[in-house]
Amino acid sequence: MLTSAQKQLKDIFFCPEESNFYAYCLETLVLNHCMGSESIIELGSGDGSPVIKSLLRSRSNGVIHGFELNKLACEAANSKIREYGLSENYIIHNRSFFDSVRPQATYLVSNPPYLPALDNKIYQPLLHGGIDGITVTKKLLTLDYENVLVMVSSYSNPEGLIDYAITKSYYTSNFIVSPLTFGYYSSEPKVKDRIWELQKNNMAFCSNNIYLLAGVLFTKRHKAKTDISTELVQVMRSLA
């Protein structure tokens, strides 16, 4: 029988350390560089905490349209949005990002599903990122947004993702990295076993307890001033 805490973790994604880091990346790499007229679109809003925190700290006047499939998470997010008076700045749609007509946007942002596993029968199926953890992120890079901020895990084939981004005419224009400990979702045996398989194939980089999470800003080649892909790869491989 699940404890109440375990049930909550299965109902709505909950990892304060990761959410706080995502919020910091949003604020530092996107919101602090946005003009008031620039719009932002988000895949996977969760309970809304990261965007809410970054909006409050940055005092941005822009509008972010989020898409979240989890109805419970969407309800929790909208409750927080109303509480903080951000209803005009953060609008969450409880429907599929990929199957919806989406507003035009200068930035696409996401902490996408990146748990690697052979199938999605894991604690939270919506966190499944494919067999190497980058399936959803690669799909985001096919949508041709000018700027894409995504969270990239060192245990989810980061080099493969960077190489794929290059084929889609994206440069790595900026990134921020933080070490995180394996948590409730990434420690699930099915996920952890797949991570070790990827590590044997030089597609995952982590220690027994620590992995690196990077907030990576991909920018279309004609807009990027510099490409720091090599530096990002070196950092992600540092736990090899």
Image (cartoon, helix red, strand yellow):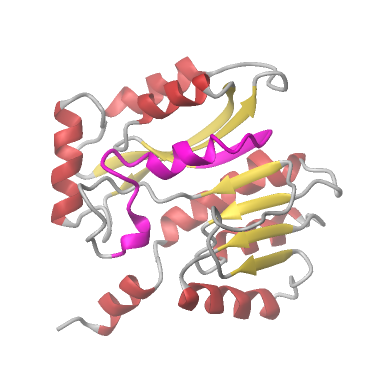
Tell me which corner region of the image, top left, top right, bottom left or bottom right, holds residue 233: top left
Question: Is residue 87 placed above or below 27 in the rendered structure?
Answer: below
Q: Residue at x 18, y 25 (%)?
A: 201
Image quadrant holding the C terminus, namely top left
Side (left or right) of 135 relative to 30: left
Question: Is residue 238 placed above or below 30 in the rendered structure?
Answer: above
Question: Over which residues does the magenta segment extend?
Answer: 124-150
Residue 175 image point, x, y percent: 54, 31
Side (left or right) of 44 relative to 17: right
Side (left or right) of 110 relative to 182: right
Residue 182 magenta-drawn?
A: no
- Name the one closer to the observer, 7 or 237: 7
Residue 69 image point, x, y percent: 48, 66
Image quadrant holding the N terminus, namely bottom left
Tally the marks.
0
Residue 144 magenta-drawn?
A: yes
Q: Residue at x 26, y 28 (%)?
A: 203
Residue 189 image point, x, y percent: 13, 54
Residue 34 image point, x, y percent: 78, 43
Tell me which corner region of the image, top left, top right, bottom left or bottom right, holds residue 225: top right
- Name the one closer to the observer, 215 or 17: 215
Side (left or right) of 123 relative to 65: left
Q: Residue at x 47, y 78 (%)?
A: 72
Question: Is residue 34 placed above or below 45 in the rendered structure?
Answer: above
